[in-house]
Image (cartoon, grey):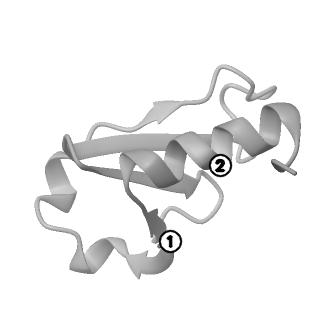
């Protein structure tokens, strides 16, 4: 399941290290997808132009998202 969460509710929000997607075209701009993993089983995603809104998911959910972005939905 994927849901929206606020960074204010993320534990250790002040020490999260965000990594930008290699597909982000504007390295310094606000048009980037970023990922952090405060715990191995809880990846977090956010858009750099709205850093206060975080998508919390599972490794399986993130893998399904990436698979669908690359290849389209499984039929």
In the rendered structure, the answer to whether residue 72 lies left or right of residue 19 reads right
Residue, disc 2: 65
In the rendered structure, the answer to whether residue 64 lies left or right of residue 16 reads right
In the rendered structure, the answer to whether residue 16 lies left or right of residue 27 reads left
Tell which circle, 1 or 2, labels the residue nearer the N-terminal end.
Answer: 1
Coordinates of residue 26 in the picture (x, y in percent) = 78, 29
Disc 1 residue crowd, few under 14, some 14–19, many 20+, Cα 10 Å? few
Which residue is outermost to the top?
Answer: 22
Figure check: 37 above or below 10: above
The secondary element bearing badge 1 is classed as loop
Residue, disc 1: 2
Q: Residue at x 81, y 26 (%)?
A: 25
Q: Residue at x 33, y 71 (%)?
A: 7
- The residue nearer to you, when weighing 27 against 37, is 37
Coordinates of residue 32 in the picture (x, y in percent) = 68, 41
Figure check: 58 above or below 56: above
Coordinates of residue 67 in the picture (x, y in percent) = 70, 37
Which residue is outermost to the front?
Answer: 75
Question: Looking at the rendering, which quadrant does residue 37 occupy?
Answer: top left
Question: Looking at the rendering, which quadrant does residue 21 occupy?
Answer: top right
Figure check: 13 above or below 9: above
- The residue nearer to you, when weighing 52 against 35, is 35
The secondary element bearing badge 2 is classed as helix
Tell me, yes or no, whether the two marked residues, 1 and 2, touch with CB atoms within 8 Å: yes
């Amino acid at each position: 399941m994927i849901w929206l969460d606020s960074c204010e509710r993320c534990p250790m929000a002040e020490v999260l290290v965000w990594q930008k997607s290699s597909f982000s075209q504007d390295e310094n701009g606000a048009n980037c997808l970023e990922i952090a993993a405060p715990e191995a089983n809880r990846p977090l995603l956010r858009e750099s132009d709205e850093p206060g809104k975080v998508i919390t998911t599972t490794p399986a959910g993130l893998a399904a998202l990436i698979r669908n972005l690359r290849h389209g939905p499984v039929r």
